[in-house]
Amino acid sequence: MLGLIDGAADYGHLGAMGAARTVKHVFLNVTADNLETRQTIHEAVNSIMAQALDASFPRRARRAYEIVRQSRGFGTGISTRLLALARPDILVVVNGESVGGLAELSGIAPSRLKKPAGYEGLIEWTMGRPWWRAQAPDTQPDRELWLYRAALIDAFVYGGNHFRKHS
Amino acid sequence: MNVTLTGEGAKLLTELIERGDFADPADAIEKALRALLNPRSGSPNKEPAGSGLSAARVQKCRPEAVAVAKLGSWPAFVAELQIRNGCWLKEYKDKFGVFSGTNSYVSTIRAAQPIIQKLWTNLTKRRLEYCSD
């Protein structure tokens, strides 16, 4: 998780970070530059943590995405992973293995999905889906799935490369 | 394939869409036709996750299957997740699932929540120690 260690657990879902050396360096090593990068990214992520799910949410999430992506080494996949882990109820991961399926689902071109405007469009598309607009279930485990419902789209579009390598 | 609906059928279809069972008329008609053409496939809910899955079901683990996963209502969404979960558990020998298995989306998101909410200036390589402070 963020390159941090947690025994034998595999956190490859929503995009593995094994090859993201620059990003792992930011999280694992305490340097002045890394602390500044962490603070910038964390502020961006925090800006959407308690944000209400109203019409302004897609634009605010787009802004957070733009800020995170400006940091060196934080590409589309890593940036959207952090955001989706922060708000799995509404945010989706866009990476090389999922972008084709997301484009097919949403009707937004793959090249556009990776850009801030396309990401904003994807959030708007998500908020318009009947399954997303459904009321929260009263009982578990459905309620937890509902809380993570946007991030779980990945299960329909992820290519499975990480799992094939590690199973 | 062209489909002509009776007045009663169109009314019922409208009710189902308004109830959130389908994304739109095309989604509803496609699912109905699929059920008619392949009645054995039935509702995804009828097959418990992890049960003996057919080759066709395993194929649904592949991303191209998104073309048939229209993700209409919440119950349909959950049913599709159950299918994926079963496929993945079988394909990855219980190591990776959607919401069950040794590692899953749900366990990953759960693990991320306390980290995301903490101050990142304190992050160290020993996540568990960090999270318990």
Image: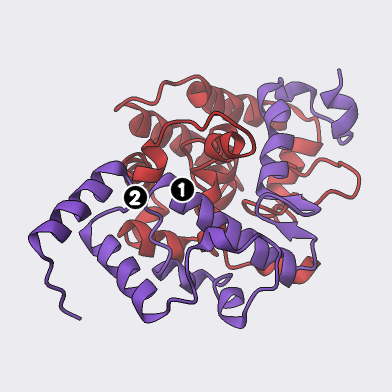
Chain colours: A red, B purple
Left or right of A71, for residue B102: right
Which is nearer the N-term, disc 2 or disc 1? 2
- Dot 1 corresponds to which residue? B75
Whole-percent x, y for residue A81 in the image: 58, 45
Please give the label number shown on residue A152. Answer: none
- Identified at 46% across, 48% down, the residue is B75
Please give the label number shown on residue B21. Answer: 2
The number of numbered discs placed on residues in the rendered structure image is 2
Are discs 2 and 1 less than 8 Å apart at CB?
A: yes
Query: What's the residue type where badge 1 is placed?
Result: Pro
Do the residues marked 2 and 1 share a common chain?
yes
- Identified at 21% across, 55% down, the residue is B13
For the residue pair A74 and A54, the one nearer the viewer reads as: A54
Whole-percent x, y for residue B64 in the image: 47, 73
| Residue A118 appears in view | yes
| Residue A110 appears in view | no
Q: Chain of mark 1?
A: B
Query: What's the residue type where badge 2 is placed?
Result: Asp
Classify mark 2: residues with Cα within 10 Å, few (<14), some (14-19) or many (20+): many
| Quadrant in the rendering for residue B97 | bottom right
- Identified at 48% across, 25% down, the residue is A48
Instruction: Give the secondary structure at mark 2.
Output: loop
Instruction: Give the secondary structure at mark 1.
Output: helix
